């Protein structure tokens, strides 16, 4: 741990120095402009630029930038200045970067945050300094009573909860649970079982694999196979998701036991690494690039033109965060908006038109949105998640 | 009984694959520690270097694998030679100094590899011809792991024969048993030591190339395989090829069959087994008889 932290400190220091000089220049420029306007609104973009979550950070950065490019670098009619900070992969590195954005760069509002551990670590910072954080990924189940923290993604247990009732109805037999043994895995299975048990689903067994140590899933998969279960619900992400899906195929479970999971099992880059082993995997997610609506079509086109990739749910949530800020800054008076008035205006937003479809705020500052069941299929010679049906609103 | 056997057959086969993979790692560590009295904590780094070589060079063809194996061999030999040269001045200064030096080297190497390959686990595909799965007594099992069992078993047999049955092996074993006596007989024991260090390192790196599709390269993998090898050495006993082989096969079964039997205790099985051995037979289960 200590070993890996040192380079992060150096990286954070370097990033800090860079951002500082950029910020210095920006402030100077703003000062000159100030004769005619109130100066740009400063937005901190807190996403990983290093570490295991870097690819998510890249998606979120690109999603945010696509929105800005579509709106001439203005939100709510005001020029914005985006200050990038590296979240890193630990709670410490993320908290240090958030501290810097709030105290040193004096941003008006922050967006981003990939890791739940970082989110838990920065709650106090944003609540006490009264600066709104429009999070676009991390959303632990424990975060329910914040005033200044919003999320455009979903709560950790929702993909599971959206899927549970459907699986209970669909599967004629018992379901086996395999999940990584940490908070997100437990949350996901808990959410799934809430709606699954209520719909009369039958559990074969519930097993948690050591995290992050497990690379060989063979003993767990062999047990699942001989348990006689009809279907399996799993929770894995990143490198573990790749290994799990490949071994699910290699040890002969694919095609025999239906595999259901939360969307990130097959979201983004991991799907390419999984290859054909992922075919026929069912996942629940709040978005997919093939959704048929006008806003999504233009979003996918702009995103593909920028990155050459199909947008992921991470990119979409970040795009929506920019949209939320756009609406809020405008409602808060454009140039006269400050952190307090922007935060109040965010809460007043009635509904947000999004590539995923229109959504509204829940009581705890997360979206109430439609969930989709997706299956990995072959599309134009490549693999992609394809929406099969809606799973209802949550 | 047949039902039980049937349910856990795959776990047992997989345990053999894991055990043999661990053997390629542990044998070098065990001999270097047993012979040179050098605790090499950079041993896992050699596996990781080999695994990254496999990731970078294997393109699904046989040629890719052969090139990766050649590169892994060279990386291992060079790495082993450098490590041996680095610890040579510390001769007689105790294990703590060696541990600090080799751990430092492994940390630096780990950061360099993160810079080169990124911080993500990189799943490595085996040659396309070995990519699928076959039916083994009615159970589906990956072809690559079967092939790996075959290759690693041959490797293990060769290493065993070389050390236990050849005259070079006799020299090495004699050096393990009594270095001063061997030196007194006119043999330059430093050459023997360098040779064993390079050989052990090369085996670990080749293990990394072959093992990459099973334990994929990524940050922290070096530490994980190092810990596994240390456990194997503790269980098998120091300085013995036979001990390393039997210890590795035992740990392989603990990691697969053991986990399948009691999945909820999976995180504790490995060290539980080590604790048991330390309590009952601290010199190792299969330690060679020596004073």
Image: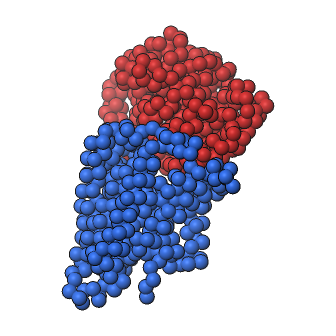
Chain colours: A red, B blue
Image-based side of A294 in relation to B113, left or right = right
Regarding residue A326, the answer to whether it shows in the image is no
| Residue nearest the observer in this picture, A326 or B119 | B119
Image-based side of A393 in relation to B283, left or right = right
Regarding residue B169, the answer to whether it shows in the image is yes
Image-based side of A155 in relation to A72, left or right = right
Residue drawn where x is 36% and y is 27% of the image: A30
Q: Quadrant of residue A380?
A: top left
Residue A297 image offset from top left, x and y in percent:
47, 13
| Residue nearest the observer in this picture, B98 or A63 | B98
Question: Where the C terminus of chain A falls, by quadrant?
Answer: top right
Residue A77 sits above or below residue A111 on the image:
above
| Residue nearest the observer in this picture, A266 or A119 | A266
Residue drawn where x is 64% and y is 18% of the image: A390
Residue drawn where x is 59% and y is 28% of the image: A282
Image-based side of A105 in relation to B76, left or right = right
Residue B9 sits above or below residue A164 on the image:
below
Seen as rendered, the residue at the extreme top is: A294
Q: Quadrant of residue A129?
A: top right
Residue A277 image offset from top left, x and y in percent:
49, 33
Residue A331 image offset from top left, x and y in percent:
56, 18
Residue A292 sits above or below residue A366 on the image:
above
| Residue nearest the observer in this picture, A217 or A54 | A217
């Amino acid at each position: 741990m200590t070993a890996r932290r040192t380079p992060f400190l150096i990286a954070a220091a370097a990033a800090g120095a860079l951002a500082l000089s950029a910020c210095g220049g920006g402030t100077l420029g703003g000062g000159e402009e100030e004769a005619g306007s109130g100066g740009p609104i400063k937005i901190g973009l807190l996403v990983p630029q290093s570490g295991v979550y870097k690819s998510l950070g890249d998606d979120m950065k690109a999603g945010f930038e696509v929105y800005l490019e579509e709106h001439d670098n203005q939100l709510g009619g005001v020029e914005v200045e985006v200050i990038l900070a590296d979240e890193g992969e630990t709670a410490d590195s993320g908290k240090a970067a958030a501290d810097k954005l709030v105290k040193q760069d004096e941003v008006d509002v922050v967006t981003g945050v990939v890791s739940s551990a970082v989110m838990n670590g920065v709650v106090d910072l944003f609540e006490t300094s009264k600066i709104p954080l429009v999070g676009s990924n991390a959303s632990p189940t424990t975060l329910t009573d914040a005033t200044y923290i919003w999320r455009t993604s979903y709560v950790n247990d929702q993909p599971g909860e959206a899927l549970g009732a459907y699986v209970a109805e669909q599967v004629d037999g018992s379901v086996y649970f395999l999940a990584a043994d940490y908070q997100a895995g437990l949350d996901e299975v808990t959410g799934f079982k809430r709606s699954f048990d209520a719909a009369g689903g039958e559990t074969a067994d519930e097993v948690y694999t050591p995290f992050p140590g497990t690379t060989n899933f063979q003993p767990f998969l062999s047990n699942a196979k001989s348990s006689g279960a009809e279907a399996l619900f799993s929770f894995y992400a990143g490198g573990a998701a790749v290994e799990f899906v490949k071994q699910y195929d290699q040890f002969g479970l694919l095609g025999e036991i239906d595999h259901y999971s939360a969307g990130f099992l097959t979201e983004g880059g991991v799907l390419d690494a999984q290859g054909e082993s992922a075919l026929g995997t069912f996942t629940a997610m709040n978005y997919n690039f093939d959704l048929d609506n006008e806003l999504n079509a233009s979003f996918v086109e702009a995103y593909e033109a920028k990155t050459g990739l199909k947008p992921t749910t991470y990119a979409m949530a970040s795009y929506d965060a920019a949209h939320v800020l756009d609406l809020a800054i405008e409602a808060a008076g454009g140039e006269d908006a400050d952190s307090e008035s922007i935060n109040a205006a965010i809460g007043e937003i009635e509904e947000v038109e999004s590539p995923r479809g229109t959504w509204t705020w829940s009581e705890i500052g997360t979206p109430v949105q439609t969930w989709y069941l997706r299956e990995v299929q072959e599309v134009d010679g490549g693999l992609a998640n394809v929406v099969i049906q809606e799973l209802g609103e949550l | 009984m047949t039902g039980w056997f049937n349910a856990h057959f795959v776990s047992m086969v997989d345990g053999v694959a894991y055990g043999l993979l661990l053997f390629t790692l542990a044998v070098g560590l065990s001999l270097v520690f047993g012979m040179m009295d050098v605790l090499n904590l950079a041993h896992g780094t050699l596996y990781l270097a080999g695994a990254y070589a496999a990731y970078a060079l294997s393109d699904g063809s046989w040629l890719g694998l052969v090139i990766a194996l050649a590169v892994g061999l060279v990386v291992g030999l060079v790495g082993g030679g450098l490590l041996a040269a680095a610890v040579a001045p510390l001769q007689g200064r105790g294990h703590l100094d060696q541990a600090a030096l080799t751990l430092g080297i492994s940390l630096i190497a780990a950061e360099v590899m993160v810079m080169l390959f990124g911080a993500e686990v990189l799943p490595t595909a085996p040659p396309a011809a070995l990519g699928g799965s076959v039916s083994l007594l009615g159970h589906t099992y990956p072809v690559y792991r079967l092939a790996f069992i075959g290759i690693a078993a041959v490797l293990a047999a060769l290493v065993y024969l070389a050390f236990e049955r050849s005259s070079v092996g006799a020299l090495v074993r004699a050096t393990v048993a009594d270095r001063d006596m061997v030196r007194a007989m006119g043999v330059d024991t430093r050459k023997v030591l360098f040779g064993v260090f390079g050989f052990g390192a090369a085996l670990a790196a080749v293990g990394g190339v072959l093992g990459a599709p099973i334990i994929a390269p990524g940050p922290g993998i070096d530490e994980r395989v190092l810990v596994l090898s240390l456990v194997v050495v503790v269980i098998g006993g120091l300085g013995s090829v036979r001990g390393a082989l039997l210890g590795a096969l035992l740990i392989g079964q603990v990691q697969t069959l053991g986990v399948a039997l009691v999945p909820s205790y999976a995180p504790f099985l490995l060290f539980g087994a080590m604790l048991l051995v330390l309590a009952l037979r601290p010199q190792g289960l299969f330690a060679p008889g020596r004073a």
